Amino acid sequence: MDGVLSALIAIVGTLLGSAVTHAFQRKASAHDRVFAAQQQLRSDRMAVYSDFAGALTEFRRGQQDRWWRRNEDPDGPAFIEARTEAYRLRGIALHSLFRVQLIASAQTLIDTAQNAHALTSSLHKAEDKTELSSLGAEAREALEQFITIASSDVQ
């Protein structure tokens, strides 16, 4: 009888140990999945935010080039080419803005990105070099503000 009781206790202990181990492994596995998802989201946000910053920087350069070519010769081929390039860059920047809107965790970040895009979009309307410089600085500062806010979203 002692042998049967010992065997029964051993079997129950083994089963209990297996059940507890399984529960802990499930919890650890779930934690690992959550951590991996958070890391992937962080990585995706980093890529989207940096792509937006790059696209907006190129768009700003394209808008300024468009302004200069228009003031040199508004009917010349250089202006037509610069305008076409600015349109292309605007499309890339807008696409990047849409990606920010899809992945950002806060409306403030989206609003800041939209503001930076809007300021950059209006650069070509400057009346003179001074206004172009001022608008360019505003657009750059808005982008820097976006980067500051975005950096807290990827930590």
Image (tube, rainbow, N blue to C red):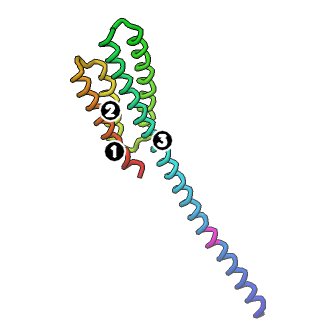
Q: Amino acid at mark 2?
A: Ala
| First in residue order: circle 2 vs circle 1 | 2
Residue at left offset 32%, top offset 17%: 68
Q: Is residue 13 left or right of residue 79?
A: right
* Picture coordinates of residue 114, whole percent (x, y): 34, 32
* Label 3: how many Cα within 10 Å (few below 14, some 14–19, many 20+): some
- Residue range (magenta): 19-23
Give the residue at mark 2. Answer: 116
Q: Secondary structure at mark 1?
A: helix
| First in residue order: circle 2 vs circle 3 | 3
* Label 2: how many Cα within 10 Å (few below 14, some 14–19, many 20+): many
* Picture coordinates of residue 32, whole percent (x, y): 56, 59
* Picture coordinates of residue 137, whole percent (x, y): 27, 32
Residue at left offset 33%, top offset 13%: 70
Asked where in the image residue 148 lies, by quadrant, the reply is top left
Q: CA distance from mark 2 to mark 1?
A: 13 Å
Q: Is residue 10 left or right of residue 51?
A: right
Name, please, the residue furthest toward the top. Answer: 75
Give the residue at mark 3. Answer: 47
The reply to whether residue 142 is visible in this rendering is: yes
Q: Is residue 59 left or right of residue 44?
A: left
